[in-house]
Image: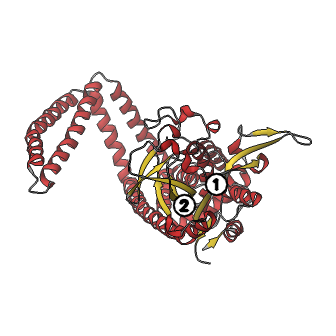
Amino acid sequence: MYLGKAAVDRLLSRAKFQVAPITDPNVWSSWIKTVVSRRIVTDREFLEKVQTRDLRRKHAEQLSIVEARATEAQLAYELCPNYPVLKELDDLIRGGTQAIASMEKYVLTTPFPAGVYLQEKIDKVAQGLPSKKVEVAQALAMREALRLETIEYANLEQAIAAKNDVYTSIGLFAAMERVAKSSKDGGGGRNKRGKSFEDTSAEVLQKNLVPLLAARHGVREEDVLVVRNIKLGMASLKGSTSELDSLIIIKSPRPQRLSFLKAKSSFALVLCVVEMKRNADDLGEAFCNLQSSLNWLAGRRDAYDAQQWVTKAYPNGHFDSTPFLQECNGEQLLFSPESFAHLNVTRVERKVIPTFTDGVGEKEEGKGKGKEFIDLFVDNVFFVCKDGCLENVPSKALSWCMSKLASEEEHGPGEAVDESALEALRLRTSERYPHKFSTSDLLALHQETGVVENIIVVGEQ
């Protein structure tokens, strides 16, 4: 494990590029080729997708004919006079079938004895089952009769059957099944690894960060609490975070303005915010997304647009309008903007901060050209990540462009790449995931501001 300056130095020493690959065509091309070569060997799901893509490339002409015919037949069917009624019957059958399954499960799996009230409910559901089954059976009969007199539906069935025959003969169905299986297996593994990392990170916070903050604020370690997965009813906005991974808090007397509340709860005073990311490449983006959320939570009204933060819980778009009660570790905690009073902002010159602050900040005249500054939450925001190479491409952007590389037929075959197709992919990735602030940018900001103890890297030294 690496703490503070050692963590910053560790990540910087493992940075592969001086710039984010998405911002430089040459770096992007080199990076993509390296990642593809690595994924082909280590990522079963990626390999299966590449093989499926190459199978489609090999039979491109044959597939284009049957897929075009199926698409044309689908369009003709959707334009035919009987389609609205057939679609309504499809929806009724689908919904009715799901309802029957749910009703049968409820009747058959509810523990016995169920109690008077629950037994009455079970009996009512059981009594409704026969009529629901009759309703679905009638809809099935009506749909079958209407399909028989609809030539467009018969043509669609024939086109789909022809397409399926080709899929089967060239092995495409089997390839698609392998992709689905590897994707399911990979997803389960990623979820387990993510949960394991969060649990490990929580232990790291308890052992390393709690003592640090207790000493900094002059309180006992046993009074410092780590609470996880805090939502506080925040709006889910693009470029913000609606859930805080962890807060480190102490219980404190309520502010005077909240003394009227009768709820039995402890007022939470936040000492710091912690973001936990397995992938170090996600730290920069996490830092960006935290800024707008923390401005809102701290009640810095000049730093956010209240209309964007309107929710059912906060009809006027301000956190201070409604103190929030949240259950944490088995007890009720009360949060308000005063909870975040310890989270100071740092005024940073804009030259240190890349594009995510465009259009934000204050100009201050100095010698020569005017300088621009921006207030950011830096001091009390901590990060925990897993040790690894730093590539400065967020995991969401990486996952998306790898999916396109593995599935779009202009790429390949195998590890082969076309430079013009790669550049087009870079531009599409940049449009979908605009470069804001890389992890290397964050580390540079910490060095510039002297805040180097806020990074923890989990891994063996």
Farthest residue to the top: give it. 81
Q: Looking at numbered disc 1 in the image, what kind of residue is underneath it?
A: Gly
Residue 171: mark: none
Please provide percent x and percent y for residue 231: 47, 49
Please provide percent x and percent y for residue 51: 48, 58
Image position of 193 (left or right of 295):
left
Name the residue that disc number 1 marks: 284
The quadrant where residue 125 appears: top left
Q: Residue at x 59, y 77 (%)?
A: 460
Most foreground residue, 46 or 53: 46
Q: Residue at x 61, y 37 (%)?
A: 301
Q: Is residue 163 visible?
A: yes
Count of all numbered marks drawn on residues in the image: 2
Task: Assess disc 1: are there few (<14), some (14-19) or many (≥20) residues with their C-alpha within 10 Å of its C-alpha.
Answer: many
Q: Earlier in the sequence, mark 1 or mark 2?
A: 2
Most foreground residue, 125 or 391: 125
Task: Assess disc 2: are there few (<14), some (14-19) or many (≥20) residues with their C-alpha within 10 Å of its C-alpha.
Answer: many
Question: What's the coloring here?
Answer: secondary structure
| Real-space Cα separation, disc 1 to disc 2, in angstroms | 12 Å
Residue 276: mark: 2
Most foreground residue, 272 or 454: 272
Image position of 350 (left or right of 267):
right
Q: Is residue 416 visible?
A: no
Q: Residue at x 50, y 70 (%)?
A: 203
Q: Name the quarter where the N terminus is drawn.
A: bottom right
Please provide percent x and percent y for residue 107: 12, 49
Q: Looking at numbered disc 2 in the image, what kind of residue is underneath it?
A: Met
* Label 2 element class: strand
Name the front one of labels 1 and 2. Answer: 2
* Label 1 element class: helix
Q: Name the quarter where the C terminus is drawn.
A: bottom right
Most foreground residue, 337 or 236: 337
